Amino acid sequence: MNSGSASTSHAPDRYDCPVCAALAGRTISVGDLAFGRDAVPKDYGDVAIVMNPLWWPRNPGSVIVVPTRHYENVFDLPTRLGGDLQLAVHDAATALRATEGCAGVTVRQNNEPGGDQEVWHFHIHVIPRHGGDGLRSPRPAPAPAHEFGTRASRLKEALRGA
Ligand SMILES: [Zn+2]
């Protein structure tokens, strides 16, 4: 277990960040899609809502909420942006519920390759959900009591002074 808080970048050398490109108004190709400033339905200044050019098969229309400056992951992200990010997540979820006719909305955020991060600009997924869409697979099971307590104690110790 890595107990450090410092981030190690996983972006390749000379990474051409697609999020920064879209925010700057530069269009790039994602498959047959021209992805650029038109994919930014709302810019709040420090954060923005951006259409996700990659869709899960049964969840079209998903978006990402991003800081407008480049930070790679949760370890790099200034905590002062938390409130602004949550506001944008709230607005995105509310808008998706109105426009996609979805049964619910999932908010998801991945960090580092081991956490399924694939785009190296911090982003929070806001995904419209539909019954039986299979996005949540496998389903979680109840935690074993002895492991739950051990892990909770370890985490409490790591968070002391945070
Ligand atoms: Zn970026």
Image (cartoon, rainbow, N blue to C red):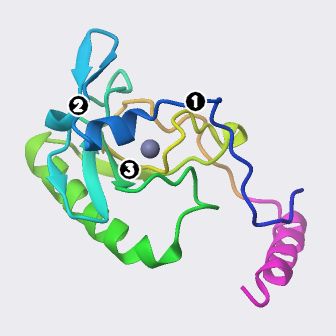
Mark before the other along the chain sequence, 2 or 3: 2
**Which residue of the protein is positioned furthest toward the bottom in this rendering?**
161
Which residue is located at x 49 percent, y 51 percent? 122
Q: Quadrant of the C terminus?
A: bottom right
Q: Residue 36's spot in the image, x, y percent?
A: 23, 31
Residue type at mark 1 is Arg
Q: Over which residues does the magenta segment extend?
A: 143-162
Judged by depth in the image, the label closer to the viewer, 2 or 3, is: 2
Residue type at mark 3 is Thr
Q: Residue 82's spot in the image, x, y percent?
A: 43, 73
Task: Tell me, for residue 36, which label it has, or none.
Answer: 2
Displayed quadrant of residue 149: bottom right
From the viewer's side, name the closer residue of 60 and 144. Answer: 60
Magenta stretch encompasses residue 62: no
Displayed quadrant of residue 101: top left
Is residue 156 shown above or below 107?
below
Cβ of mark 1 under 8 Å from ligand 1: the answer is no
Are dots 2 and 1 in contact, CB under 8 Å? no
Task: Tell me, for residue 14, which label it has, or none.
Answer: 1
Q: Main secondary structure of the magenta part?
A: helix
Q: Secondary structure at mark 3?
A: strand
Q: Residue 126's spot in the image, x, y percent?
A: 34, 48
Q: CA distance from mark 3 to mark 1?
A: 32 Å
From the viewer's side, name the closer residue of 83 and 99. Answer: 83
Q: Secondary structure at mark 1?
A: loop
Q: Which residue is mark 3?
A: 106
Residue 115 shows in this picture:
yes
